[in-house]
Image (spheres, grey):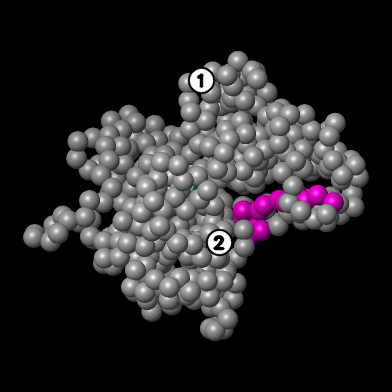
Amino acid sequence: MSDYQKRLLKAIPGGAHTYSRGFDQYPENAPEILARGKAASVFDDQGREYLDYGMALRAVSLGYANEAVDEAAFTQIKAGNNLTRPSLIELEAAETLIDLIDSVDMVKFTKNGSTAVSAAVKLARAYTGRDLIARCSEHPFFSYDDWFIGSTPIQKGIPKNIIEQTKCFAYNDITSLEALFEQYPDQISCVVLEPSNVDHPAPSSTHPGETYLHDVQRLCKKYGAVFVLDEMITGFRWHIKGAQHFYNIQPDLCTFGKAMANGFSLAAVAGKREIMQLGSIEKTGEERLFLLSTTHGAEMCSLGAFVRSVQFIQEHDVIAHLWGYGEKLIAMMNRLAEQKGIAHCFEAGGVACSPWYITKDHTGQISMPLRTLFSQEMINQGVLMPWIALSFCHQDEAFEKTQNAMDKALDVYVQAIEKQSVEGLLHGAVIKPVFRQRN
Ligand SMILES: Cc1ncc(COP(=O)(O)O)c(C=O)c1O
């Protein structure tokens, strides 16, 4: 363990400010600390460059240190960055999101996605007068708050009554959601899911031309629950107007974050006026709901970065680029796996603007040792690919580099498949899942 890793673990629980940035998520040869990022690359403390597919946990979609966005943020920093009453950029940013997203009448900004999704849940509880939450089990993360973490294997520190209030249903399986509504009549306040994660929503089984998302919306209406789409990942990637526009669906509430301000800290809860206005103050005598009130929620540099990011995406057709690059990348990864005779053990796929890869052993079981080996070998070739997050700066040169890296990494992978073991090939510990009960 290097000096940096020891210092990080000594100073910070988990050694990082996000568990998915922790040392247990990377092979031993991964850079332990980073000094900076530019375009699609990150650089470690020694100046070593890595082509990055992590992209700050998907918070950066235009490339690191985008000059136009940074300039817009600097302008706001120089204007004071955080004033005593609402700022001009605060209004401009709110109106930008409202103009852009079809379902949105009102918006409240905050710094983190978790805070935004928890605010949507609070609004839903207040609006319906109900306590229970239905959340999609396949979607890996909605919030660091107890209502969500209590529904994962990491329940330490969370009161039992909170754990009991969150119920899970399966994506693309409308009967599992309907079963929850039937099991808990008049108790479910909201249904929380991503519009899409590893798959598109399936076609509706009852309404031709519609999808699973429309079925979810129908159930929410039938049972009086609030329909919440978490667009933290899909927003500003699937479509500039969100995956909700892409799939032609209008949620009651939605949340955004991650790529909305190209790495600046900004998230939002937004949606229909009828629900959002529960957090308003102008109706005299109405009982109040305390909706997101933070000192830094409207920090001006992030709002300036957001407004400029939206313009940049529109000016450069960034979304089309993400889809095109992703499609080429998936095809290339699968072609190489096929050429090397390991298509049954290594596969890329997913929604093209947000691809995934999976690593399987010779029996077809998902394999973390092989994922670690693949990651290790990509890093040996200068490519950091913990998952695949694309940016506008992943262009032809990045593609070439990825292809060459993949070619070499899969040669080592083939050896592991032939030996039916990573022994002697993998140097260091196997990556562990974030959501495990024990270290
Ligand atoms: C779908 C989804 N929702 C919410 C969050 C929480 O966002 P944040 O990390 O900004 O709190 C994440 C973060 O990974 C996410 O992927």
- Compare marks 2 and 1 and give the one earlier in the sequence: 1
Q: Amino acid at mark 2?
A: Ser
* Residue at the spot 53% in from the left edge and 59% down from the top edge: 137
**Furthest-left residue in this view:** 285
Quarter of the figure that contains the N terminus: top right
Which of discs 2 and 1 lies nearer the camera? The answer is 1
Residue 246, visible in the rendered structure? no
* Residue at the spot 31% in from the left edge and 41% down from the top edge: 297
Count of marks, rendered view:
2
* 92 vs 216: above or below: above
* Residue at the spot 77% in from the left edge and 51% down from the top edge: 360
**Residue 104 x/y as whole percent:** 35, 62
**Residue 232 x/y as whole percent:** 47, 52
Q: Amino acid at mark 1?
A: Lys
354 in the magenta segment: yes
Q: Is mark 1 within 8 Å of ligand 1?
A: no
Q: Which mark is residue 196?
A: 2
9 in the magenta segment: no
Instruction: Give the structural element (helix, strand or loop) at label 2.
Output: loop
Q: Is mark 2 within 8 Å of ligand 1?
A: no
